[in-house]
Amino acid sequence: MNFLRFIFENRGQVAELTLEHLWLVGISTLFATLIGIPLGIAIARRSHLDKPVLATANIVQTIPSLALFGFLLPLPWLGARADRLAILALTLYALLPIIRNTYTGIRSVDPSVVEAARGMGLTDSQLLYQVQLPLAVSVILSGIRVAVVISVGMATIAAAIGAGGLGEFIFRGLAMVDNSVILAGAVPAAILALVADYGLGWVERRLQP
Amino acid sequence: MLYAMSPAAETPVIEFRDVAYRVDGHEILDALNLQVRRGETLVLLGRSGSGKTSTLKLVNCLQSASSGDVLVNGVANRDADVIALRRSIGYVIQEVGLLPHYTVRQNVGLVPKISGWPPDRISSRVEDLMKLVGLNPDLASRYPHQLSGGQRQRVGVARALAADPEILLMDEPFGALDPLTRDELQREFLALQQSLQKTVLFVTHDLREALRLGSRIALMEAGRLVTVLPPQEFVRSEDRWASAYVRAFGGDLGSIADRRSS
């Protein structure tokens, strides 16, 4: 339980890094949501776009994270600050689950319900906002939940390019060969992931139609 | 009343003019010519795949004709405002298609709401409609999955009637119900139709239902209209397909057809 003492003695820094971590995850999830949900809706409605978009998001997902950080480093404005880079990379990783779940959620709304609604005279946007999105909301939310959990883990690697976050303890501990320092980064990160998973899971169940 | 005096009285409410409908080169409907008159219940009878549901969906533009014209009140559907057209036509389907996340009240009030009615007018309309179709007002705050099949179907009918459309399209509305509930709803449909006098296009594969509810029966087979006859003539028809249908159902069909006319 050495790491608990370490955490207690460095609680100021732990809090700071946790906040940094949350910032990286929060802002990148927000971006991914703002991009991913409209994109998922678009490909659910225009079916010729679905395969290329999902394939692209899939490929991005398979790039090893350290390599992605490396690729992005030479970019002009973004490469200048590590946290911008980290946010971009995390956003790219978070896109796939959000796009895919939005797409699946909308596509899996009972076709007879959609057809009846169209038959009633709902416009395309009424259909989207009053029927498809409300019925897909829990599936979309579970995509966001997966994205957050992935990001919390992925964000620890952001410390490798100096973007901060709980990964700093992990890399420092690795360099010092000191498990308690590694755990001081890993355990709070794991707790963050669990809390986010549980919290969003709760919201998801509440919104179940 | 206006219609009775104007020359529009001669215009069929729904008219199919030489309509064909193809999907990926596959022919669903061909050379369809049919008129639905004001206030009648025209039943489209036929087996699965005969094209009767497609015929129905051509009316509210859920499908569009490959050639020929579908006219509603003399206006060709290809020139019509689709959204306005659909809102002016009541639509009831077998799976009901109630919005599962809406309460009974919201489902029934759907068309008035999207048409921009004020809320108090919607709620009084919903109340009236639930009474009209025999639904207990206590059910208004329930969700569709909390209702029985018969109740769901009643909600479907109430929803279709909400904006007081002149035309009702009904696609096997009672098909999924148990025989007793179906009988009850058919009886109520007849009573309702007697007072409301809607122009109804009704799809079924059940000859008994067709004889009982229809003013005229349009028999369809493999995408073609075979014949259009009133129920009493249908049961006595010499037509190959019509008599095959009558034989298949057997029993006292004549009495069903005649009881209607009496």
Image: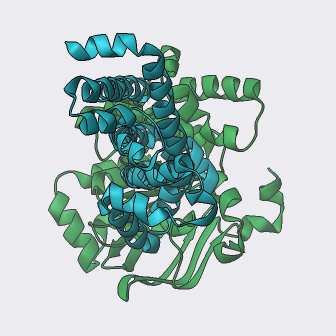
Chain colours: A cyan, B green
Q: Residue at x 53, y 17 (%)?
A: B137
Q: Position of residue A137 (x, y in %)?
A: 45, 39
Q: Residue at x 33, y 63 (%)?
A: A58
Q: Left or right: B118 with respect to B167?
A: right
Q: Left or right: A189 with respect to B253?
A: right
Q: Residue at x 49, y 68 (%)?
A: A46
Tally of marks: 0
For the question of whether residue B49 can be seen, the reply is yes
Q: Position of residue A109 (x, y in %)?
A: 39, 48
Q: Quadrant of residue B82?
A: bottom right
User: Which residue is more in the foreground, B79 or A32?
Assistant: A32
Q: Position of residue A171 (x, y in %)?
A: 32, 39
For the question of whether residue B191 can be seen, the reply is no
The vertical placement of B25 against A208, above or below, is below
Q: Position of residue A84 (x, y in %)?
A: 56, 50
The vertical placement of A105 against A75, above or below, is above
User: Which residue is more in the foreground, B40 or B100?
Assistant: B100
